[in-house]
Amino acid sequence: MEGPTALNTEQLHAWTSKAMTRARSGQLPDYIPRLSRASPHWFALQITGVDGQTHTLGDSCLQFPLMSIVKPFLLLYLLCQWGEESVFKRVGIEPSSEPYNSLSQLQHDQGWPRNPMINSGAITLASILSETDSTSGYQSLWNWLNYYGHCQLFLDERMLASVKSFPNPRNEAIARELATRGHLTEAVSALDTYNRLCCLSGTIVDLAHLGMLLLECPPPLQSSHCHTVKALMTTCGLYQASGRFAVQVGLPTKSGVSGAVLSVVPHLGVIACYSPPLNREGNSVAGLFMVEQIAKALDLSIFS
Ligand code: GLU
């Protein structure tokens, strides 16, 4: 099978211009002021193959926060540090048909977070870091990602200030519900750690490097942990759109509300895309379009 770098640049440019037309139908998130001021025209794409070949399109200098794309890496880190048994005592592995920040799903499940890719699950996992060290728990994950992922993520303090400047009653209620039900001990510091993790930022090249971590799984990472993370990206990574995307495209994928999308093509490479306008489910319109075109043209679905 040909890897995702097998495409020629002309083809990628043609899809990019279609993707940008489609992105006009998307919206910028309104609950994080700094994200709402992103340009809908910003675009970057990086495809990296296991053979070391790359394709970079658009503006590879753009920096953006990972937002929810940090969730699979938070899970990976904790699996490596704590092992599957301890981690999955705190969070489930079931998909959810509700939005990523659904409180009603959590209440329906008696406060048990369904999976690590939605906010309830990620806030619970962030609490493991904050319970260890409330002021710098997130730093251990940050350093770990930069070291093993060979990337240069930084904490975007202005983005963090913007996140904190605007009340997020949904996330606050989720954290309180988790604490009330005994799934975490300290709601405020768990949420603070979660917000910091979401504001770890980098370029499209950093994002592709992170994706390669899941693919190459360098020691001491265990391949079974990378396998678990990729499986959960496939079933839960795009929230309510995960099932449809698995059928139509078939690649483990995670999105973030900043407009970033990361897809892993097992054994072959990664596709990372950044374009801020989002669809109704909170996924980048152009990002999903690009991954779909590339996957279909090369028949990359893991179910092929
Ligand atoms: N920080 C965002 C939130 O909790 C992350 C959501 C996302 O990227 O999908 O609302």
Image (cartoon, helix red, strand yellow):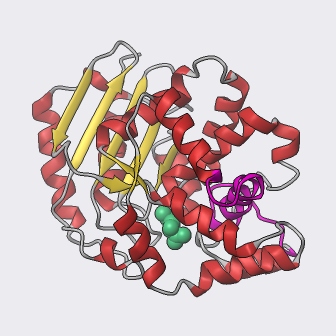
Give the image location of residue 16, x and y in percent: 17, 48
Quadrant of the image occupied by residue 271: top left
Can the viewer see residue 61? yes
In-image side of 198 versus 10 (left or right):
right
Give the answer, above or below, for where 94 lies relative to 175: above
Whether residue 60 is in magenta: the answer is no
Q: Count numbered badges in the picture.
A: 0
Can the viewer see residue 73? no
Quadrant of the image occupied by residue 92: bottom right
- Asked whether 291 or 204 is in front, the reply is 204
Give the image location of residue 136, x and y in percent: 61, 53
Q: Residue at x 65, y 52 (%)?
A: 137
Which residues lie in the magenta part?
Answer: 110-137
Quadrant of the image occupied by residue 188: bottom right
Whether residue 125 is in magenta: the answer is yes
Give the answer, above or below, for where 146 lies relative to 88: above
Q: Residue at x 44, y 20 (%)?
A: 268
Q: Residue at x 70, y 31 (%)?
A: 225
Give the image location of residue 222, x and y in percent: 70, 23
Q: Residue furthest top?
A: 51
In-image side of 274 versus 192 (left or right):
left
Tell me the quadrant of the picture where the N terminus can be found. top left
Give the image location of residue 4, x and y in percent: 33, 26
- Asked whether 253 or 87 is in front, the reply is 87
Q: Residue at x 39, y 76 (%)?
A: 162
